[in-house]
Amino acid sequence: MTAPLPPSAFAHPAVLLSGPVDYAMYRDFRGQFESVACEGVVSVELTTLGGDPEVARMMGEDIRFRTDMHPDCRFVFLGKAAIYSAGTTFMSFFARGNRYLTRGTRLMVHERKMQKDLRIEGPLTTCIAPIKAALHEIECSIAIQNEGFENLIRGSKVTMEEVLRRAPENWYIEAEEARSLGLIEGVI
């Protein structure tokens, strides 16, 4: 169990990110993250309206890996203003006790989205493979999405059933509500 942090712990973030979660953000993240000394509290600050969930997972895996490599270092997340979609996915990689939001910040949780045209053409026996491939892609994406939901709610009052019920409609959670639900440690 870690002690809650005062606002002063976030005065000088080691990693400061804003904008869409994309490969440009990942390069910026890696550049800042690689130069961080792994000692004490290391804060990562983010503001985002969302982006690529796989990039969020890559950044999250970097946090998870470095946390495992340096158990004496405490990586903490500070979300400011808006932590939507892929930003919430990234936040879910931080231990619940290391997640903080500024006052009035909103989290947004939603299902992954897909846009794909599936064209079926040709001899009937060749039409089955692309249909199965699309189905497998959807099933795998749902499994990855649900792993992220499980990471987000672990140790909170939120059930998986509630996330699955609310996520299709874009679930917005204000900072104090996120704290009372146990999704984050505190509001700064």
Image: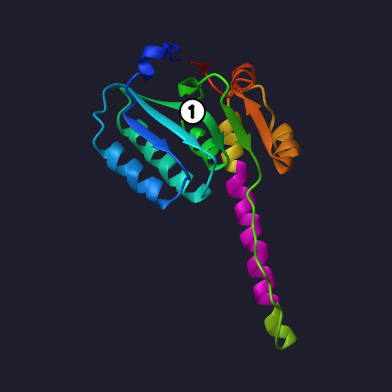
At 65% from the left edge and 56% from the top edge, which residue is drawn?
A: 139
The region drawn magenta spans: 128-146
- The quarter of the displayed image where residue 43 is located: top left
Is 182 placed above or below 114 here?
above
For the image, the number of numbered tags is 1
Residue visible at 49% across and 27% down in the picture? 80
Residue 15: image location, x then y, percent: 34, 32
Q: Give x and y (percent) for residue 46.
A: 44, 33
Above or below, comparing residue 112 to residue 2 in the picture: below
Q: Is residue 180 above or below residue 52?
A: above
Q: Nearer the viewer, residue 184 or 17?
A: 17
Q: Quadrant of residue 30?
A: top left
Residue 42: horizontal and vertical position, in percent? 33, 25
For this orientation, the residue located farthest to the bottom is: 123
Q: Is residue 165 magenta?
A: no
User: Taken as a whole, is the magenta stretch helix, strand or loop?
Assistant: helix
Tell me the quadrant of the picture where the N terminus can be found. top left
Task: Judge from the rendering whether residue 146 lies leftward or rightward of residue 37; answer left or right.
Answer: right
Secondary element under disc 1, as helix, strand or loop, is: strand
Crowding at dot 1, Cα within 10 Å, few <14 / some 14-19 / many 20+, comes out as many
Question: Would residue 149 be found to the left or right of residue 8 on screen?
Answer: right
Amino acid type, mark 1: Gly
Residue at 46 percent across and 30 percent down: it is: 94
Seen from the viewer's position, the closer of residues 185 and 155 is: 185
Q: Which residue is mark 1?
A: 79
Q: How is the image coloured?
A: rainbow
Residue 13 placement, left or right of 84? left
Where is residue 108 drawn, in percent x and y?
62, 35
